[in-house]
Amino acid sequence: GPLMGKLCSFNCLRWSLIFLNIFYITLGLILIGLVIATRTLTYMSEPHVLIVTAVAGSILVLLAIFGMIGAVRHNQVILFFYMIVLGLSLLFMFAVSVAALVTPKKIQETALATSWAALSDSQKSAIQISLNCCGFNNVTQNNSNSDSPG
């Protein structure tokens, strides 16, 4: 009857939430793994990017564990706070995405040029070899001179 239908839909929803949180845990661990793997690369000059990625991965794992506990224990209070935190993080990610999209190209170019200038010669060389380019602006030729301006 109707009770069986409600019970079935509740269980389906609960298992969906559990599997979604398993996916989030996996995604968070992948982010943390990428940070660990990237730290071994020689041309990664911005530790802030790695720190933000590691923090985002850690928060995602903790939030997913929090949501899974709420789903397994049928705890409405935990699920309510889980929903609030997910909503706030969605708004934050949306705001960051919009800010990244509307940042003027000149500011992006200036930030990239500043980062390029801060790299060591070996880091510049590694990037140029991997991207098959020469300097910051030149993408058509590959020379061994890493100091060329482009």
Image: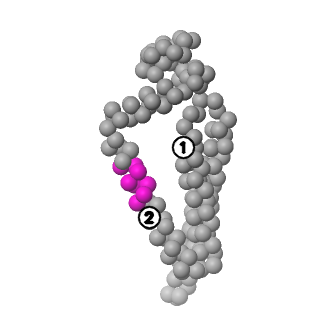
- The magenta segment: 91-98
Q: Mark 1 or mark 2, which has the lower sequence index?
A: 1
Residue under the point 40% across and 60% down? 91
Residue under the point 58% across and 69% down? 67
How far is disc 1 from disc 2 in space, using C-alphas? 23 Å
Q: Nearer the viewer, mark 1 or mark 2?
A: 1
Task: Say above or below: 37 vs 139.
Answer: below
Prevalent SS, magenta region = helix
- Residue 96 % position (x, y): 41, 51
Q: Amino acid at mark 1?
A: His
Q: Amino acid at mark 2?
A: Leu
Q: Kindly indicate the quadrant of the structure image that contains residue 25.
A: bottom right
Q: Is residue 22 left or right of residue 108?
A: right
Q: Is residue 70 left or right of residue 87?
A: right
Count residues near mark 1 (Cα–Cα under 10 Å), then give few for <14, some for 14-19, many for 20+: few
Q: Is residue 12 visible?
A: no
Residue under the point 48% across and 31% down? 115
Residue under the point 54% across and 27% down? 119
Q: Nearer the viewer, residue 36 or 116?
A: 116
Task: Say above or below: 57 vs 9.
Answer: above
Q: Kindly indicate the quadrant of the structure image that contains residue 114.
A: top left
- The image quadrant where one finds the C terminus is top left
> In the image, is residue 96 part of the stretch drawn in magenta?
yes
Task: Say above or below: 28 vs 138.
Answer: below
- Residue 32 % position (x, y): 63, 49
What residue does disc 2 label? 88
Say which element carries label 2. Answer: helix
- Residue 42 % position (x, y): 63, 30
Marker count (numbered):
2
What residue does disc 1 label? 48
Task: Say above or below: 14 vs 94.
Answer: below
